[in-house]
Image (cartoon, grey):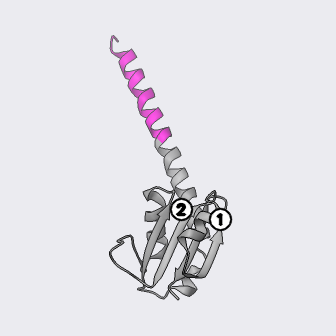
Amino acid sequence: MRHLPIYILLLFGIAAAAFMHTGKKVNANKDLALIMNGLRGIEEHLPMGTNVSARFVGVDNAPYLMCRYVLAPRYLSMDTAVQLDTSFLLCTAGTTDSAVKTLVDGQKVIWEHKDDRYHYFLTCNP
């Protein structure tokens, strides 16, 4: 009987952790769905097995991993030492037009899409 408050606190802690974990999973699914919708249409420009150099401006690692997942078996390389003729650029939607122009300067834009959160570009060297 003396341990009842400890068990109750433990139960509340487990319930709170389960609730927080479920919330994170739902947000991750929403983010993945947003990336999948944003990349719709890029497949016709990238054959299977293509190697593409990737640049991500103003975003963390999660969108990079999601893009790799959605575009598989195409390979996104973030290695700057490797010079590939096709580049994929993902930046936040709030990135100014002059900054975007600087990032894609000298390259031909093959495909472009913008949604509420991200601005996607597929470019190639002329």
Q: Toward which corner of the image does residue 113 lie, by quadrant?
A: bottom right
- Residue 41 appearing in the image: no
- Residue 103, percent across and down? 53, 70
| Disc 1 residue crowd, few under 14, some 14–19, many 20+, Cα 10 Å | few
Q: Which secondary structure class fits the magenta region best?
A: helix
Q: Secondary structure at mark 1?
A: helix
Can you tell which of label 1 and label 2 is closer to the viewer?
1
Identify which residue, 11 or 103, lies in the foreground: 103
Say above or below: 99 vs 3.
below
Q: Toward which corner of the image does residue 74 lie, by quadrant?
A: bottom left
Q: Which residue is mark 1?
A: 97
Q: Residue at x 46, y 55 (%)?
A: 60
On the picture, is 3 further left or further right than 125? left
Q: Are the residues flagged by discs 1 and 2 in contact, CB closer than 8 Å?
A: no
Say above or below: 115 vs 10.
below
Amino acid bearing label 2: Leu
Q: CA distance from mark 1 to mark 2?
A: 25 Å
Identify which residue, 61 or 99, lies in the foreground: 99
Q: Is residue 68 magenta?
A: no
Say above or below: 111 vs 55.
below
Q: Which mark is residue 32?
A: 2
Q: Secondary structure at mark 2?
A: helix
Q: Residue at x 39, y 15 (%)?
A: 5
Q: Earlier in the sequence, mark 1 or mark 2?
A: 2
Amino acid bearing label 1: Asp
Which contiguous range is marked in magenta? 1-20
- Residue 64, percent across and down? 45, 64
On the picture, is 57 further left or further right than 13? right
- Residue 29, percent across and down? 53, 57
Q: Is residue 19 magenta?
A: yes
- Residue 115 appearing in the image: yes
Q: Residue at x 33, y 15 (%)?
A: 3
